[in-house]
Image: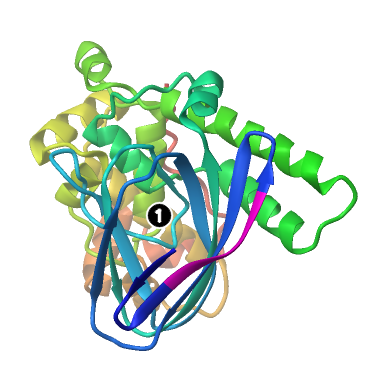
Amino acid sequence: MAASTGYVRRVSATYTFPHVAVDLLDAHKPVAHVIQENGINAEHIIGAEMRSAGSLQSSWRYVGSAGPKDTPCDALSYLPAQIPWGTAIAGRGEASGIACRFTPDYFHTITGIGNDWSERHLRACQDLSSSVIRDMVRKIYHEIRTPGFASDIVISSLSHVILVELARYFQAIASPDEERRTGTLSKRDLDRIRGIVENALNERLSIRQLANALGYSEGYFYGLFKQSTGITPHKYIETLRIEKAMELLAGDGHSIKQIAYAVGFSNPSSFSAAFRRVTGSSPSQAMGQRPSRLSKLEWA
């Protein structure tokens, strides 16, 4: 499919079904230096990495005025038709993946999605946080690798549902005009923030990082988040950390010091102070107790 000095990416096989063509991709890179590639697709492509070995790391971005920052290629991703993109490949190794290709006419017929892509929507294309779509792409991959009875019908049906789910995914993203009108974040954005925080509880997560994930300035995001939830982003991060700490305290084999570090506190004393502030009791009093959910925020 593409070749550069020291890097080869090719389509190992292509399978054509009603309304979708599926490419199985293989990549091999024996050199460590970073290699850049650029392209533009005539079709809409939904793909994912299925296997990787070695230190191979790829990232990609949309290029041009609406180009968000690089995103790892191992995430489920969607490349709209006629949007220029670029990749950066580092390390050595091998990888394989799958790409489902849809013609623009069929894609528009099913999804109703046009070509007016905002930066926020392109960011969402880069990181499809949809377990439903991911599972269906993997199902297509396995149906091709180990076909069973009526696999062509199964794959065609799955590809149709993938587009339906993609349309629902983008409908859940409020437009900037809608957010300015309501003054709140969408349910999808709030769910995404929770996922980001939960995956980085032991890190020093900044408000700027959360704002960047949604394509907002730090100040604008801060106001939207507080208006949407009734608490500040700082308070929310702290609450989720204490919630995780309560789970660890309910188990066996962890000291308070270990738990403090595990949920992102620099020392046990600051952890104890935050724990008492959120729960009204000390970590030692909570040891062995059944944990409760503290972050009961109802997303609209």
In this view, 184 is above or below 293: above
Q: Decide which of 102, 232 is in the foreground and name it.
A: 102
Q: Residue at x 22, y 15 (%)?
A: 177
Residue name at image x 39 percent, y 83 percent: 55
Q: Is 74 on the left-hand or right-hand side of 97?
A: left
Q: Who's the residue at 80% across and 39% down the image?
A: 153
Q: Which residues are magenta?
A: 9-15
Q: Position of residue 225 (x, y in %)?
A: 24, 32
Q: Is residue 234 visible?
A: no
Residue wearing tag 1: 198
- Asked whether residue 31 is drawn in magenta, I would say no
Residue 272 position by quadrant? bottom left
In magenta stretch: residue 13: yes
Q: Residue furthest top?
A: 181
Instruction: Give the residue drawn at x 68%, y 51%.
Output: 140
Percent x, y of residue 1: 44, 63
